[in-house]
Image (cartoon, rainbow, N blue to C red):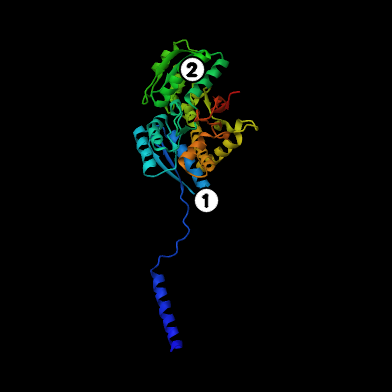
Amino acid sequence: MVQRRIPAIASRIAGAALSLFALLPPPAHAQAPEPVRIGAFLSVTGPAAFLGDPELKTLEMYVERINAEGGVLGGRKLQLVSYDDAGDAEKARTFAKRLIEQDKVDLIVGGSTTGTTMAALPLAEQAGTPFISLAGAVPIVEPVKKWVFKTPHTDRMACEKIFVDAQARKLTRIALISGSGGFDKSMRGECLKTAAKYGVEFVADETYGANDTDMTAQLTKIKGSGAQAVLNAGFGQGPAIVTRNYRQVGLTLPLYQSHGVASREYIKLSGPAAEGVRLPAAALLVSDLLPAGDAQKPVVANYRKAFEDKYKTDVSTFGGHAYDGLMLALNAMKAAGGTDKAKVRDALEATRGYVGTGGVVNMSASDHMGLDLSAFRMLEVKEGNWSLVK
């Protein structure tokens, strides 16, 4: 009996086990690690699209490339969460809030303009989210904000680089013309504050509106001011209009522009009138003209080739700012051993010797940009292209 019952009992036990197994969930597969979330709000459309468009293209290109190579931090993929603020400060604030509170990003790289950056800056500070701005004005990092950093050279540096060049050309009486935007106003103020240090006297101070399409009235006043040179503090399409009108009113004085127009788009918009214009800019625009021993040459040459090969369009320094922002962020995460925001912030502040498209970056507790005047190159438009002023 026993021998006959054992198979029966075994059969019932096996059947019960199979039934129980059917009710259990399938075995869990190893879950992919959480992605590293990079947030961005950029002016991809609107009047500052010449900034935001190459910035977004750059972030997308390198996120795709890094993920294809295996990701970061031991296999974590990058996830780019980006919004187009169209240059509107209120939209930028809304998107920054969404990135922090809803999207739960680990870090923000963005803010194409000074206005959009300044609108979002308090939110990053309050939330304790590392924020690397791509805008130029001094107030972004002065006074130092705990959680805020930036990649572009400042407007004050642009003023100083221009004044150094003017000194070398024995130009001391300069006329100033500037736009009404946040960057324009900030650069105008920085130029006024630093002029005396370089022996520069401003003999005129004219302004134009964001929607102005003709600046001949202001330039006619400048023509009679006794100026030896003219400095246009501005970005966007305004400086191209100033440049065209400059020649139309018969001005032949040296004309300086800001690094806010450091792209071939400015030359295209200005046409032949841009010939001879000088401006300070990053080495990226003249990568092919840099000497072989220049520390930046391989970095800017590689970025330029990657961007132009993929998008079939000219590189700009603005896309370079986004490249530097992303690489600084990833280097800091690597140094921090993860995405802990406080540790990443501390690692950003401790950045030393990073060679980027904007220059060699050495940050500190008192300097959240880390560039000095040597990071700027003085360029001149010659025969419709950039040349390096020796």
Residue at which label 1 appears = 75
- In the depicted view, which residue is nearer to us: 226 or 23? 23
Quarter of the figure with the C terminus: top right
Left or right of 367, for residue 221: left
In this view, which residue lies farthest toward the right? 293
Q: Which residue lies furthest to the front in this view?
A: 2
> Residue shown at 44%/80% (left/top)?
10
Q: What residue type is labelled 2?
A: Thr
Q: Quadrant of residue 241?
A: top left
Q: Within 10 angstroms of label 2, few (less than 14), some, or many (20 or more) residues?
A: some
Q: Is mark 2 on a helix, strand or loop?
A: helix
Vertical side of 205 occupied by 382: above or below? below
Q: Where is residue 249 in the image (x, y as percent from the top left)?
A: 44, 16
Q: Position of residue 180 (x, y in %)?
A: 38, 23
Q: What is the x, y in percent for residue 267? A: 49, 28
In the depicted structure, whether residue 274 falls above or below residue 81: above
